[in-house]
């Protein structure tokens, strides 16, 4: 089966992408704020206990995020004037309303990120998925006061129906397809959905949990990613996302290196420090 969701487009053959105010790079922080079910295996730091119920080792590790990690990350983003683009499980609205309250104070934007990070819609029928997605979007809108414009699937998962179903619900962009440094249009039923670059590699879970890198390694990866995009951005605009999970980079010994990397990136001229919502709105309006 070929992928008909988007057309092939070589970045070197596209018209120059001119970002607002002549910026070279649009930089956004994708902050994953999630809820996990107690009795379902999920992202784990130690596989040996992942199938136990309960699994204090892995569940507790993940549960550091809403209790401590997100608050440390929040202070760090405040330091650099960065508004988070939150990949939000709708169950967070019920279980951790304080996070929603503080995020709204800061003007954070809220993307739909499934009901929780223990459920994937991969095997749902179209009608089951339609109801599932509607509940998520409605819950986020009710508790944040804002219609979510973006979507990231738990584990970046979709069905073949997901994009068009999201389009029906008023979502304008998705981040699941990490295959570009620029936004681009998707081939949906109404033609009103775009892809905004997220990152599966410049992402703390694959780097720290998957590869066991150090905080210094993380700093260097962020700097190297930025340096190349910044140089290329002189010719045509680029988008850089750093994907964060507060149970990973929210820990003290990693947070200090994220601090250093954010200082480096935001210290450059020609960087549009923005949100995924703003990138999508700008791209749609200028297309």
Image (cartoon, rainbow, N blue to C red):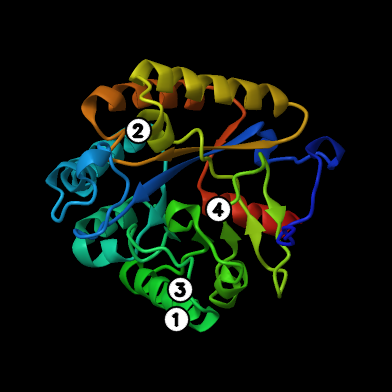
Category of crowding for the residue at label 3, using alpha-carbon neighbours closer than 10 angstroms: few (below 14), some (14–19), many (at least 20): many
Above or below, 66 against 157 in this view is above
For the residues marked 4 and 3, what is the alpha-carbon distance in whole angstroms? 15 Å
Q: Viewer-nearest of labels 2 and 4?
A: 2
Label 3 with label 1: CB-CB less than 8 Å: yes
Residue pointed to by mark 3: 133
Of callouts 1 and 2, the N-terminal one: 1
Tag 1, which secondary structure? helix
Indicate which disc, 2 or 3, sits on the residue closer to the N terminus. Answer: 3
Q: Secondary structure under badge 3?
A: helix
Residue situated furthest bottom in the rendering: 127
Marks 2 and 1: in contact by CB < 8 Å?
no
Give the answer, above or below, for where 82 lies relative to 254.
Answer: below
Question: Residue at coordinates 27% horizontally, 61% vertically from top-left?
Answer: 92
The alpha-carbon separation of the residues under discs 3 and 1 comes to: 6 Å
* Category of crowding for the residue at label 4, using alpha-carbon neighbours closer than 10 angstroms: few (below 14), some (14–19), many (at least 20): many
- Residue at screen point 67% across, 38% down: 21
CA separation, marks 1 and 2? 33 Å
Please identify the quadrant where the N terminus is shown: bottom right
Q: CA distance from mark 4 to mark 1?
A: 20 Å
Residue carrying label 2: 209
Discs 1/2, front: 2
Q: Which mark is residue 131?
A: 1
Residue 97 drawn at (x, y percent): 22, 62
Which numbered disc covers residue 176? 4
Q: Earlier in the sequence, mark 2 or mark 4?
A: 4
Please name whichever residue, 103 or 214, is drawn nearer the observer in this view of the structure. Answer: 214
Q: Nearer the viewer, mark 2 or mark 3?
A: 2
Task: Tell me how far mark 2 sits from mark 4, CA to CA.
Answer: 20 Å
Instruction: Say whether residue 49 is visible.
Output: yes
In the drawing, does residue 150 fall left or right of residue 13?
left
């Amino acid at each position: 089966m070929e992928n008909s969701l988007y057309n092939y487009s070589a970045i070197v053959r596209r018209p120059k992408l001119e970002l607002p105010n002549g910026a070279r790079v649009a930089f956004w922080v994708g902050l994953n704020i999630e809820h996990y079910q107690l009795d379902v295996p999920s992202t784990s730091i130690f596989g040996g206990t992942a199938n136990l119920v309960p699994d204090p080792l892995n569940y507790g590790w993940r549960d550091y995020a809403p209790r401590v990690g997100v608050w440390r990350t929040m202070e760090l983003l405040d330091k650099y004037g960065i508004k988070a683009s939150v990949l939000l499980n709708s169950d967070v609205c019920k279980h951790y309303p304080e996070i929603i309250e503080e995020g709204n104070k800061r003007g954070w934007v809220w993307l739909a990120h499934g009901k929780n990070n223990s459920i994937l819609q991969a095997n749902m029928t179209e009608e089951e998925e339609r109801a599932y997605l509607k509940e998520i979007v409605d819950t986020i809108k009710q508790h944040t006061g804002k219609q979510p414009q973006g979507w990231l699937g738990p584990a970046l998962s979709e069905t073949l129906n997901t994009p068009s179903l999201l389009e029906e619900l008023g979502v304008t962009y998705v981040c699941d397809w990490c295959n570009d440094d620029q936004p681009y249009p998707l081939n949906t039923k109404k033609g009103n959905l775009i892809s905004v670059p997220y990152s599966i590699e410049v992402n703390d879970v694959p780097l720290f949990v998957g590869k066991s890198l150090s905080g210094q390694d993380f700093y260097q990866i962020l700097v190297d990613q930025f340096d190349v995009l910044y140089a290329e951005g002189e010719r045509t605009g680029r988008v850089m996302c750093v994907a964060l999970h507060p149970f990973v980079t929210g820990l003290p010994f990693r947070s200090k290196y994220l601090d250093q990397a954010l200082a480096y990136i935001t210290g450059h001229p020609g960087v549009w420090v923005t949100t995924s919502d703003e990138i999508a709105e700008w791209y749609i309006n200028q297309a």
